[in-house]
Image: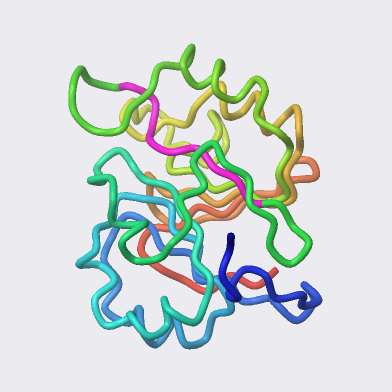
Amino acid sequence: MLDARYRKNTDLRTITKILHYSDQSEPKLKELFQQADVLFTTGDLSSFDFIGTETELSIKPGFGVYGNHCTPGYLERLGILNVHLQVFEWHGLTIGGYQGCPRYKTGGGLQFTEEEAQRDLDNFPRVDILLLHAGPFGLLDTPGDEVHIGSKAVKNYVDRVQPKYVFCGHDSPSAELQYGNTTLFRTHQARIIEI
């Protein structure tokens, strides 16, 4: 059962400030967290990247996925809901996610083949908010960067279900993109995003 941080029946119009945190430690995290209504974290961080935010993590909801350089377990230890291949309802919206990145080397890290991702996402239900480490292929990718490329299977999912929002990391710099009915946000480090 979700605790009160996730069950509040609040009108989404009053929940507008999202702290999106990904890939690189943020020295002003506590200050940013105090401005936010909710935390979305999209990987390549560790418990050490959240030091000093224990109070905020205990009173504000957090949702996240692991990146390819993460050691699994820290989200759960911090009380952040791991949304990898799971769907949670929060304030009338559904939130789900997919962890890791497309395989670019053998061994190590949370990496997947496109076939694995397609199989995982073929029957994954529609969500309003999708949290990813690596984004959809061709959307916010860095041209020619084989390591920080997005996933074709994830793009197929986005094309099929058209979530309202996609949050990802894995690459820099921070950027936004409107893609059909979907607004994508890529964050490197941490920032407040208003929706």
State the residue at coordinates (24%, 76%): 51
Residue 170 horizontal/vertical position (percent): 37, 44
Dominant secondary structure of the residues highlighted in magenta in the image: strand
**Rendered image quadrant of residue 107:** top left
* Residue sitting at the far top: 115
Q: Which percent across, then down, holds residue 56?
A: 42, 82
Give the quarter of the figure containing the N terminus: bottom right
Above or below, 146 against 53 in this view is: above
Q: How many marks?
A: 0
The residue depicted at 55 percent of the width and 33 percent of the height is 136
Give the left or right position of residue 138, taking residue 16 as reference: left
Viewer-nearest residue: 115 or 91: 91
Question: In percent of the image, x 50 and y 37: which residue is there?
Answer: 98
Residue 59 among magenta residues: no
The answer to which of 77 and 11 lies nearer the viewer is 77
Q: Which residue sits at x=52%, y=78%?
A: 60
Is the residue 136 above or below the residue 182 in the image? above
In this picture the colour scheme is rainbow
Q: Which residues are magenta?
A: 95-103
Could you tell whether 12 is left or right of 138 in the image? right
| The C terminus sits in image quarter | bottom right
Q: As rendered, which of 87 and 147 lies closer to the eye?
A: 87
Residue 99 magenta: yes
Q: Furthest residue to the front?
A: 1
Q: Position of residue 90 (x, y in %)?
A: 68, 62
Q: Tell me if residue 65 comes above or below residue 56 in the rendering.
A: above
| Residue 73 percent across, percent down from the top left | 28, 50
Q: Nearer the viewer, residue 30 or 145?
A: 30
